[in-house]
Amino acid sequence: MDKALNEFTGTVRRAVDDYDMIQEGDKIAVGVSGGKDSLILLLALKHLQSFYPKAFQLEAITLELGFEGMDFAPVAELCRNWEIPYTCLKTDIKEIVFDVRREENPCSLCAKMRRGALNDAIKQKGINKLALGHHFDDAVETFMMSLLFEGRISCFRPVTYLDRSGVTQIRPLIYAGEQKIANLAESLQVPVVENPCPQDKGSKRYEIKQLLKTLGGDYPDMKSKVFGAMQRLPLPGWEPRPNWRQAK
């Protein structure tokens, strides 16, 4: 087993344990977009599966949004090599959002449609948990977006139960930084599928990412302090389980 992946999986396990993300007998699907985050999450959970004390099933699901040039055949090959069940579903999300609706701010509708399609797919498979590739930097960026654009103290939760679908969303990468994920993806040579979405570098999230990058030049520990504040406030759902390490 790759030493770097083994070390990275330790970071994932810490998040899983801190927020009690995995239970015995869980059926977990990873939403694989083809990006580095979801691919590394998939491999880390596969490695975790081999030694975690709570047995769980794992598979991968990709939604094809309809953008040209996105080839998921290498992702399917990766899953075959790692013995991970893989499903790739074609959708008309790109057509609806960009061609039919011609949304001025398409990200919100696209995200909503992707969530709905994923939840429908995993419900049909009897899967009870959906693992998403949101990482440490995503959490800080989301917090800052809510603060600066909406005037709210808010962020997605590490664990979210969706009562309408009965699916629980988990985010095992919340302790992993984006650069660490990128380095591991390069080391393992995972088959990243580039995102051709025209909004990829024109969104509010991208603006905040650039702002944090600029501020980070003068305050290199700023993101860690923001993340720590989110846990200490704590934001709803962000307080780690108390003293679980001491109890083990």
Image (cartoon, rainbow, N blue to C red):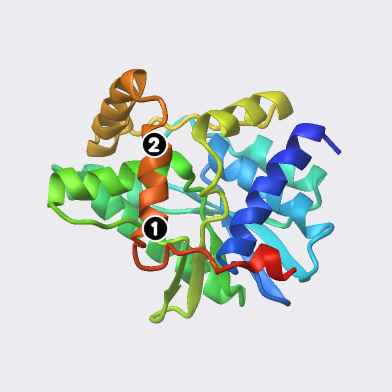
Instruction: Tell me if residue 66 can be seen.
Output: no
Numbered tag placed on residue 232 in the rendering = 1
Residue type at mark 1 is Arg
Across and down, in percent, residue 143 comes to 30, 48
Inspect the image, locate mark 2, and give the three-letter code of the amino acid beneath it: Lys
* Position of the C terminus by quadrant: bottom right
Identify the element where label 1 is drawn.
helix
Q: How many other residues sit within 10 Å of disc 2, few (<14), some (14-19) or many (≥20)?
A: some
Q: Secondary structure at mark 2?
A: helix
Question: Which mark, residue 21?
Answer: none
Spatial CA span between label 1 and label 2: 14 Å
Instruction: Give the residue at x 78% y 41%.
Output: 6
The part of the image, by quadrant, that contains residue 5 is top right
Q: Is residue 15 above or below residue 27?
A: above
Instruction: Locate the N terminus and report the quarter of the image it occupies.
Output: top right
Check disc 2 and report the residue beneath it: 223
* Nearer to the camera, 60 or 41: 41
Horizontally, residue 239 falls left or right of residue 183, namely: left
Percent of width and height locating residue 183: 62, 26
Residue nearest the observer in this picture, 71 or 105: 105
Query: In this rendering, would 12 be left or right of 140?
Result: right
Q: Position of residue 16 (x, y in %)?
A: 62, 60
In this view, the mark in front (1 or 2): 1
